[in-house]
Image (cartoon, helix red, strand yellow):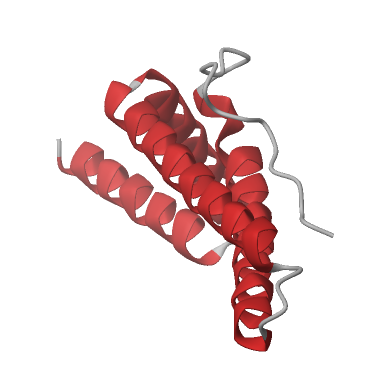
Amino acid sequence: MKNFVGFVGFCVFAGIIYISFIPEGRAKWNSYWNKMQKVDDATLYQTRKSVEYQCRAMQASYMTDKVIYELYWDSEDREERGWGQNAKIRANKTAIIYNEFILKNSYVWKDNVPDDIKEELSKIE
């Protein structure tokens, strides 16, 4: 019995060393938990709802800035043209962040994207 407990203790210790200090062990550990997180995210309604809300919020921000840009970009007033340029910068930044967000979270929908969520926002040139 003493030998068995000693063997189990040694195995646990060796496993901790393998996972903590050896790159291959760390890679396997991280790969396993990454796969588990993706499965959880794909099946949890809360995660999907959160991603959808964030997408809709970024779309609304983008559309607001785009409308402001289109309203003021050719204004005769210098200050209003500045507002338009600032709105363009914000809209383009939002588009870049949104497109990256969609790429990183596309596994949540698995080709079942809601109709009101665009797959990409274009930059304003």
- For this orientation, the residue located farthest to the bottom is 78
- Describe residue 37's horizontal placement relative to residue 96 as left or right: left
Image: 53 above or below 25: above
> Vertically, is 63 above or below 52?
below
Q: Residue furthest front?
A: 76
Numbered disc total: 0
Q: Is residue 25 visible?
A: no
Left or right side of 85 for 43: left
Q: Residue furthest right?
A: 125
Nearer to me, 92 or 104: 92
At horizontal 52% and vertical 43% (from top left) the residue drawn is 59
**Quick one: 48 or 119, which is closer to the camera?**
119
In front here: 19 or 109? Answer: 109
Q: Is residue 117 left or right of residue 16?
A: right
Q: Position of residue 122 (x, y in %)?
A: 76, 46
Image height of 66 relative to 1, above or below: below
Is residue 4 in sight in this rendering?
Answer: yes
Please report the residue visible at 51 percent of the width from the left and 17 percent of the height from the top.
Answer: 114
Please give the name of the residue rendered at 24% of the width and 42% of the height, measured from the top-left corner. 3
Q: Residue 20, located in which quarter of the rendered image? A: bottom left
Left or right: 68 with respect to 57?
right
Residue drawn at point x = 84 percent, y = 60 percent: 125
